[in-house]
Image: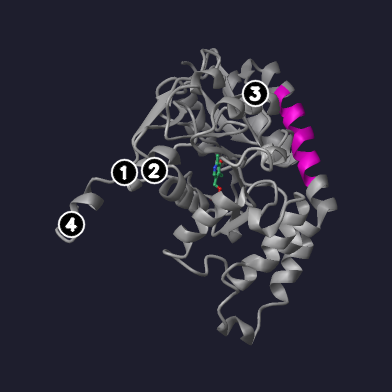
Amino acid sequence: MSQYWSDFVSGLDPYSPGEQPDLTDIIKLNTNENPYGPSPKALQAVEALLNQDLRLYPPPGADSLKHTIAAYYQLTPANVFVGNSSDEVLAHVFNGLLRHSKPLLFPDITYSFYPVFCQLYDISYQRLPLTDDLCLDLADYVRPNGGIIFPNPNAPTGRLLSLQAIENLLAVNHTSVVVIDEAYIDFGGESAVSLINEYHNLLVVQTMSKSRSLAGMRIGYALGSAELIEGLDRVKNSFNSYPLGHLQIAAGVAAFEDKAYFQQTCNQVIQSRRSLTVALEEIGFEVLPSKGNFVFVRHQHYEAAIVAKKLRDKGIFVRHFDQERIREFLRITIGTEDQNQQLLDTLKNLINQHLTK
Ligand SMILES: *Cc1c(COP(=O)(O)O)cnc(C)c1O
């Protein structure tokens, strides 16, 4: 607290991201980064720009990146909004498209940044509970609302909704914006981007942090009707005209163009998710079916918070959310085959030591 803060700032309850430890010799499975590095072509594209031209402002609309993303999804650049991370894109979405008099709807168990944005932008909201087995039931969202947002697959459960379920909601919800946060869609889900031309109130938000291995570059984007994108541009141009720098734009374009690397690394993560799931089940974990680059697991005998702490002592970081309904669970990012094996070996040792609940 400080006398210099406004009452508003004193009252904020900010998002707390997973730890980014400084240690080198650790296995980091706590923030869903991609264990494989960015496309070598993205790195080359960045290196090629390390010169005097960095004195110049970047193109304010990041047009080359918008064109590349539009072409990839068979849309037009008018359907694309880009920003400095999808968190920033989401901030503009909450501010510009979801701030209405009726409450915004989202799940009780979901990305914990959503209520933070609501507080920041003074948006009233209603959290709709997931079912007992932590599934999102979209039939529940058919009620008066000022907007709807959820991740697909959901975070931190990893559970995926079908495109049909999403279309069923869109078919009856015309008067507010429906935002699908597809941070993890490339790990085995079907994107709702194909519905954009039909539903002008649908906005799909994606990030280059997970499937494209560029979390350190901070690149996010939204796809939707020209009407929604124009609304976001109005907010962005009232906030920061140049959200993406030269290096981000070049890295983003190159990563999108290197489809072979993208597919190969996503497939590897999907394959490792399958084998890690089986191996975790063998040692007594329940593993929710995940279509993300992580698994959400619990053990019948061992307390999640204690397991997380013991793993941390051994240099393995996973995520535990001290939150009602999911206190028993750990979220574990899919690592390389080698990292996953070390995780399993460490868990087996802990279990053999009869780590009690
Ligand atoms: C990781 C994540 C984001 C944020 O991605 P950035 O582009 O790195 O800010 C947004 N939504 C969900 C559900 C995420 O898991």
Could you tell me the amino acid type at mark 4?
Answer: Ser
User: What is the quadrant of residue 123 in the picture?
Assistant: top left
Task: Specify few, some or many for label 2: CA neighbours under 10 Å numbering under 14, 14-19, or 20 or more.
Answer: some
Q: Residue at x 45, y 58 (%)?
A: 235
Whether residue 72 is situated above or below residue 189 in the rendered picture: below
- The disc, 2 or 1, on the residue closer to the chain's N-terminal end is 2
- Toward the left, the furthest residue is 3
Image location of residue 43, percent across then percent down = 72, 66
Q: Which residue is mark 2?
A: 99
What label does residue 122 carry, if any? Answer: 1
Helix or strand or loop: what does disc 1 sit on? Answer: loop
Q: Which residue is mark 4?
A: 2
Q: Main secondary structure of the magenta part?
A: helix
Helix or strand or loop: what does disc 3 sit on? Answer: helix
Task: Specify few, some or many for label 4: CA neighbours under 10 Å numbering under 14, 14-19, or 20 or more.
Answer: few
Q: Which residues are magenta?
A: 265-277
Image location of residue 95, percent across then percent down = 41, 49
Could you give the CA–CA distance between mark 4 and mark 2, rounded to whole angstroms? 29 Å
Could you give the CA–CA distance between mark 2 and mark 3, rounded to whole angstroms? 25 Å
Could you tell me the amino acid type at mark 1?
Answer: Asp
Q: Residue at x 65, y 28 (%)?
A: 167
Could you tell me the amino acid type at mark 3?
Answer: Ala
Can the viewer see residue 128 in this picture?
A: yes
**Which callout, 4 or 3, points to the residue nearer the camera?**
3
- The disc, 4 or 3, on the residue closer to the chain's N-terminal end is 4
- Toward the bottom, the furthest residue is 52
Left or right for 313, reference 10: right
Verify CB contact (< 8 Å) between mark 3 and mark 1.
no
Q: Residue at x 63, y 28 (%)?
A: 166
- The disc, 1 or 4, on the residue closer to the chain's N-terminal end is 4
Helix or strand or loop: what does disc 4 sit on? Answer: loop
